[in-house]
Image (tube, grey):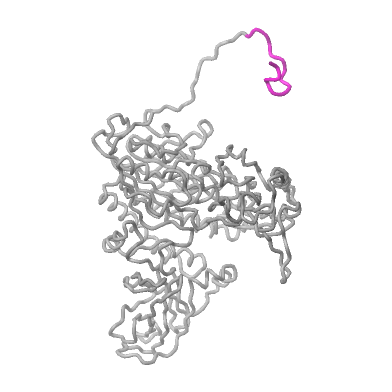
Amino acid sequence: MIPRCEAINRCGDDPYGDVTVSKRVFILGLDALSPKIVERLVEEGSLPNFQKLMERGAFSKALPAIPAQTPENWTTVATGAWPGTHGITMWGRHDHGELVTERKADEAMSSNLCKAEYLWEAAGRQGLRSIVFYFVGYPPTTDKAVYVDWFWRPGDYYFEICRAACYLSYIPERVKDSIRKRRQAFRSTAFLVEFEEAVDWVNVPESRSTPLEAEIRVEPKMGGRGVTYYALLLDTEGEGYDSCLLAREKDGRKALCTLRPGEWSEWYREEFEVGGEVKVGTVRFKLVELSRDGSRFRLYRSQVYPIHGFTHPPELSEELVERFGPYINEGVSRLFFLGLVDEKTLIEEFDYQIRWISRAAEYLMDKYEASIFIMHWHFIDTLQHRVLGLADPEGGMYDPSRSREAMRLLKLGYRIADRLVGGFLKLVDSRTYLIVVSDHGNVPNRKRYSIVRALAERGLVRVERGPDGRERVDWTRSKVFVDLTNVYVNLKSRYAGGVVEDSEYEEVRRRVIDALRSCKDQDGEYVVLLALRREDAPLVGLWGPHVGDVVFVYSQGFTWGVEGFERESVKVGGANHGPQPPTAETDLASNYAALFIVGPRVKKGYRRPIDFLGPAQLVDVAPTACYLLGIDPPRHSQGRILYDFLEGWDVSEMVRERKPLKFPKALAPIKGDVTDLV
């Protein structure tokens, strides 16, 4: 029985806390944190704060909802509801009356699509305040919650004015491959600059070599009016260029800063015009590299966020900036993986961000007398998509010569996450709980297989050859639409421009399931682990009008190739979580989520016995957090309270004396369903 509270979490019938003290729960969401990798690195002694979590609290693998993706599972954590209930059953949603291809992907994290009550809404109706930090569930839905930033989509930031960027005079050798693979990402984050002999400057500092100048332009990512700085290379010691002066105009006395390699500037406030609106944002630089002859120059710029409006209430933004400095997110990671900035810069940016988050979290909880802090942090997922397949021998492109470096980078990312955990561990006391949870894990890809080709060969998908000779799918004329692990029948009665009659529905669906279950690659491996009708999908937590007519999950190691048309599977690298079973594991990695709880009266050093109790599930997080606070869970919550994590709950297997039984007659051998014998 969950204890009830009227307004504040001071419940007389609450067995898990001092009845006179209001309690707090911090929920730290670490995207894609893998329980197996954490255990391995803790055992090595590489993650001291995760080690403290495990020694001082309780730990379990946690089963994600299907598909094991970000929007579905963070919404599950936030509501305690299965995707069938909260309505986000894929990366977005398909609504009746629209084109079958309309998927609302940009709203996947938003409250616009969620049909279930959030944890902070449930707390709010019971009189408690919450802090929602870079999480799903926006725009704001209750005045009892304070929001900081919105989690829009990985690698893109809703309130960001300018992406983090690097200005460079040459293309480093290790960057060239990144440009080839991700040209668009490179263009939006890297800008080649040309240095020439400086002209029209006044009050130039002494330089033993001819000063060289270049323009540094800071442009809003969505277009508009930006800011131009002038960079001036100086030789102050007669041994070649050793410093870079930055100024808004060509006047040495009005320089903003003079940087040597490895040094950061202060933050500067600048005006940007975006969408006809003037926004004040914050800019800072780091001189990453400067060769003595001036030919090799790299200047990093942090993300530009506004000083106003990235919070709810909007005016809170300026207060946080004044107290803790300008806000940034994880923009540096894109540049690091493109090879544009070094590891030291990556670590310095994350050190700044982590320090900002942990200080702001404590301040906001005190300022608003809040009971819940819930946040999301994405870097582990970004990292694992890129390096896990190289570190794990089961990866399709695993290379022993590259595995040591990949494992080192993987460990680096988990150590950064460990620092974030440490900032929150310090807040745990006699009235405070810390829950650390991920939305899924990650496992290496081995093969890509074209489900589209398999369906096209059965006449279910229309593939046409364009003027350039390349094959393309015409989804509007196809009988079905494939959206990740959902297949939607393009019914005339359901979708605008649909092509399938209601009378054909079951036959089309039967052919889809037959095709999926028959997919076998040239090595004899089945590509699809399971394929279910919508009516059978409640087996995996999926139901309702937004789930596919057919739901499927790839076999372990296979990844989606929706736009590919290969007739055979193709060996691929990288790592993924969404297409593969939530239970997929290798010796190194796991697609399970991770769950840790530490706080008053939580068992110390407890590891849930998975073989006996099974894993925890992500639907369990919200109701368990509410139980710890002494309040009712969200009203659509379908999870359980994790009593076994708490002191006083004995979950050891029952051992009973086996007593002899005499039956009237011996059973006949079972030749089918046991009820056939009745």
Tell me if 582 is positioned left or right of 669 in this view.
Answer: left
Residue at the spot x=39%, y=80% of the render? 228
Residue 444 coordinates in the image, percent (x, y): 59, 52
Residue 669 in the magenta stretch? The answer is yes
Image quadrant assignment for residue 386: bottom right
Residue at the spot x=35%, y=66% of the render? 306
Please identify the residue farthest to the bottom as the structure is shown.
Answer: 200
- On the rendered image, what quadrant is the N terminus found in? top left
Residue 472 higher or lower than 176, as above or below = above
Residue 129 in the magenta stretch? The answer is no
Q: Nearer the viewer, residue 503 or 45?
A: 503
Residue 60 coordinates in the image, percent (x, y): 47, 39
Q: Nearer the viewer, residue 460 or 642?
A: 460
Please identify the residue farthest to the left as the structure is shown.
Answer: 20
Main SS, magenta residues = loop
Residue 485 higher or lower than 235, as above or below = above
Magenta residues, start to end = 663-678
Visible in this render: residue 525?
Answer: no
Residue 320 coordinates in the image, percent (x, y): 29, 60
Visible in this render: residue 224?
Answer: yes
Q: Nearer the viewer, residue 261 or 670?
A: 670
